[in-house]
Image (tube, helix red, strand yellow):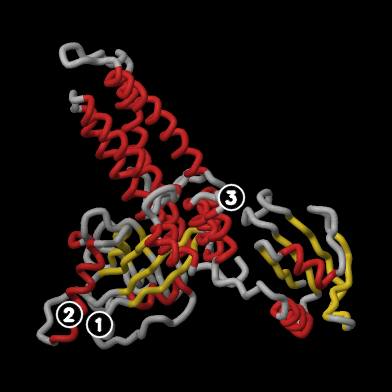
Amino acid sequence: MALVRISGPKADAALEALAGILPVPRMATLAKLRDGEEVLDSALIIRFPGPASATGEDVAELHLHGGRAVVASVLAALGCIDGLRPALPGEFTRRAFEHGRIDLAEAEGLADLVEAETEAQRRQAMALAGGALGRQVAAWQDELLALSALVEAALDFSDEDDVAPLPDAFVGRLGALRGELASWLARPPAERLRDGVRVVIAGPPNAGKSTLLNVLIGRDAAIISAHPGTTRDLIEAPVAFAGIPFLLIDTAGLRDSADEVEAIGVARARASAEAADVILWLGPPDEAPAGAIRLHAKSDLRPAVMPVNHSISATTGTGLDDLIRLLVDRTATLLPQEGEVALNARHRGALGEAESALGEAETMSDLLILAELFRTARTALDRVTGKAGVEEMLGGLFGRFCIGK
């Protein structure tokens, strides 16, 4: 099956031109689509009069048989109707945003849903697309408007010598609102779900790092050799364990080297380890970075001589399932909890500005400045849902969608 969607003031006219009828709104109707006297397809057609439609405009849907020739002939017939043109990538979603059918956070959720590859990414995208963040921002805006009204009232009923005091509960309500914003800002970022938890495999040369990477991802991404210094650059490989996205990173063996290229690789390895969410350490346990999972690799060849967190063998598979479970357990505090909405960088920037303005407001006694700080916070929150100051990023967002979405 193929779906052709038409949105805009010409939707009804286009539907009537092809089907010869205008069906009852929101009721699937079987009709023959024609281009002049030629029958193009027998299709289900549905009308969605605006503004109660996906885009807020008049919308028509043609549910076609999915052959390429059928789709091509229908699109060609539509292209001959005056006022119709092919949609741009993401244009239907953008029109829904511009007509107030969804907010910007919901549009971002839809874009994430289109790109979701793991169960965790799907759940997060669904929560965002379902309006969870928009509803929370609306609640914050309601409380902020109520606090702003108290400040404006105090200003309106004050004179030069006698400023009306704010209610006793004002400070507590302001502190509670700021605390909620700070709590959301402290949540694990959405980027970990999108890009994967960064797991760096580190240690000295010939410790088995590349072999471990290949075994964990199930393919030969890294070259394996008995010659020390074979791996000279970062090798990144995405993988999912238990529906959770990971980015595994093989690194150059950590050692001093006179080889200029290898030395650059070692420097990159150290920098990658510093930026890692989790480090798998395959070197001497007493040299492991703080917080690293200390592994005894090649356990089929020799026993561990110092305490480690786990023993593995890439050759026999011993301990690998337990290592994967350990990695999944380590992500418990690194990823959003089920049902919890994670903030992306844009959300955090806007909420951070609002939280900062409220923090300054907590120390402010001048009512005029206090009112201005509240306006700053409200404007920042409006950017989360797209009510203010987001025009420069809309093209990039909606360009992530496919044609027809």
Q: Residue 116 at x, y = what percent?
A: 53, 63
Q: Secondary structure at mark 1?
A: loop
Q: Residue 196 at x, y = what percent?
A: 41, 62
Q: Amino acid at mark 2?
A: Ile
Name the residue at 52% across, 61% down. 111
Q: Which residue is mark 2?
A: 264
Q: Secondary structure at mark 2?
A: helix
Q: Residue 137 at x, y = what percent?
A: 44, 39
Q: Which residue is mark 1?
A: 232
C-alpha gap between disc 3 and disc 1:
51 Å
Please state which of residues 47 and 103 is positioned toward the viewer in this rendering: 47
Q: Amino acid at mark 3?
A: Arg
Please state which of residues 245 and 141 is positioned toward the viewer in this rendering: 141
Mark toward the start of the polypeptide (2 vs 3): 3
C-alpha gap between disc 2 and disc 3:
51 Å
Q: Amino acid at mark 1?
A: Arg
Mark toward the start of the polypeptide (3 vs 1): 3
> Which quadrant is home to the C terminus?
bottom right
Name the residue at 44% across, 82% down. 220
Q: Secondary structure at mark 3?
A: loop
Residue 242 visible, this orientation: no
Evaluate if marks 1 and 2 touch, with contact meaning CB atoms under 8 Å apart. yes
Please state which of residues 179 and 243 is positioned toward the viewer in this rendering: 179
Number of other residues with Cα within 10 Å of mark 2, as a class: few under 14, some 14 to 19, many 20 or more: some
Q: Residue 309 at x, y = what percent?
A: 33, 56
Tell me the mark number nearer the camera, choosing from 2 and 3.
3
